[in-house]
Image (cartoon, helix red, strand yellow):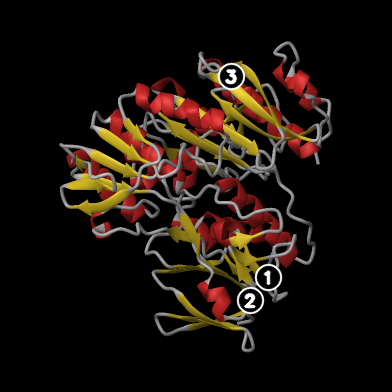
Amino acid sequence: MPNVTYISHTGETTTIDVPVGTTVMENAIKNGIDGIVAECGGAMMCATCHVYVDPAFLDRLDPIGDEQEEMLGATAAERKPNSRLSCQIHMKPQLAGLIVRMPERQT
Amino acid sequence: MQPGVVIVGGGQAGLEAAAALRTLGYDGTVTLICEEAHAPYQRPPLSKDFLTGKQEADGVFLRALAYYEKHRIDLILGDRVTEINRGGRLVHLAGGGTVAYEQLILAVGSRNRSLPVPGAKHALYLRSLDEAVTLRQRLAEARHGVVVIGGGFIGLEVAAAARGAGKPVTVVEAAPRLMARAVSPPLSDFFLDVHRGQGAEVLLNTAVAEVRPDCVTLTGGRRIDADLVVAGIGVVPNVELAREAGLDVSDGITVDEFLRTSDPDIFAIGDCSHHPRARLESVQNAVDQAKCVARAVMGNPAPYRDVPWFWTDQYEIRFQMAGLSGGHEQSVLRGSIENRKFSVFYFKQGRLLAVDSVNRFGDHIAARKMLAAGTALTPEQASDETVDLKKLAATQSVG
């Protein structure tokens, strides 16, 4: 099973196995990883599961949809080119070893 | 142990209040008392992706159990507060225990309104995870037909899930239009077309006389075969605990703009809380009131002023609401109802009150920003698609 490494804004690193098809957000919640909040539960109504994707993986992600684009305009921390909502990152084999960094704040 | 904050109710409001206290650095004890045997979970998916089978039960929990331990949130599951002893500053539990508090947060939610007709016990309701598990099972087994009593958000989401699963569906609504309490007539008409277009029978101005194990009878005498009857006719806020403790209650537990009840050490948030502006039943209200109450507990109160928002998914339609449209004097359309991509903007005395959006995500986000910032928007601008709302919203500083 592919894994994902989550790095908190203070540098705390957690690597977990993430089943293909599930999202980076839901695996963070299930594994009690702080720094990803997901107030709306992945319905794309909030921007509290914001992460910075390691640049090495950017071209393997699906394109940012219109809705995610709008929501990324409402993040609490700075939006950067590698900003994504982790509820929209669905695990696939090409993303094995994915590294995401959590912003300092989600709200 | 020094008494700290006790939160009564393990819905999203209660959980988010506990989480917000820890985020703000609250150092005292935090106790979260949940009546259900489950740790706090999300309710929105129960009538959406969980019901349609796209999401499983293990995906609805708001936090992992490890979270509560790590953040020193004492989770009491499967127990209920039976009495608030304000003089002694403690709550009594049905299981026999007591928990002392310095400050108490009531996040006791609401409960489903019961169907006031004979045979109501044959109808299912949907609010809790356990009810959702039962409903999903019964929906899978339904052969002859599904009758949904109540054409509000929950009823229509259930109807959409049932139609999506290929079941014959009849929606019975007592009012002259759908979702009448929350949306304006053009939106009610739109959703009537959507549901009828998907093959659901929708009966308006129609009352149920009786529910039987294999059918529903209407007051006009018609009998509708059904092996599954679901009632979604609204909720009633749980005010009893507060009332028995002598707190002011009306439609909800009365709170001031800082979410304080008539006892300065007791707050009320979420569905049960009647704020001067309104009593709201939504994720937004639960989450934002939780953050607001955490600030008040920390001695840094700010009035609750967040923009209300809400969403519902029915078939391929995403409907989003920002603001509260009640009392509007004027409404204008942006986009095309025919193409199922439009928003309705509501104004009162030239000021934007609310925006309802159908498959217009950008409008919804812009509306939330403009309502928060108090951006001036004219009805002419709202209906003119050449006006870039996103840009207009962005030129305003928020907060």
| Residue B216 horizontal side relative to residue B273, left or right | left
Asked if labels 2 and 3 share a chain, the reply is: no
Type of amino acid under label 1: Thr
Mark 3 falls on what kind of element?
Answer: helix
Residue B222, how many percent across, how many down?
A: 22, 41
Indicate the position of residue B193 as horizontal and vertical percent values. Answer: 42, 24
- The x and y percentages for residue B25 are 70, 61
Evaluate if marks 1 and 2 touch, with contact meaning CB atoms under 8 Å apart. yes
Residue B261 shows which numbered tag? Answer: 1
- Could you tell me how far apart the alpha carbons at marks 3 and 1 are, in whole angstroms? 42 Å
Tell me the element at label 2.
loop
> Residue drawn at (58%, 57%), measured in percent from left and top?
B270
Horizontal side of B216 relative to A28 (left or right) equals left
Chain letter for mark 1, please.
B
Q: Which residue is mark 3?
A: A66
Can residue B137 be seen in the rendering of this structure? no
Rendered residue at 55%/28% (across/down)? B186
* Left or right, B144 with reference to B65: left
Give the Cα separation between the discs numbered 1 and 2.
7 Å
Q: Quadrant of residue B322?
A: top right
Q: Would you say residue B250 is visible in this rendering?
A: yes
Q: Give whichever of A74, A25 is nearer the camera.
A: A74
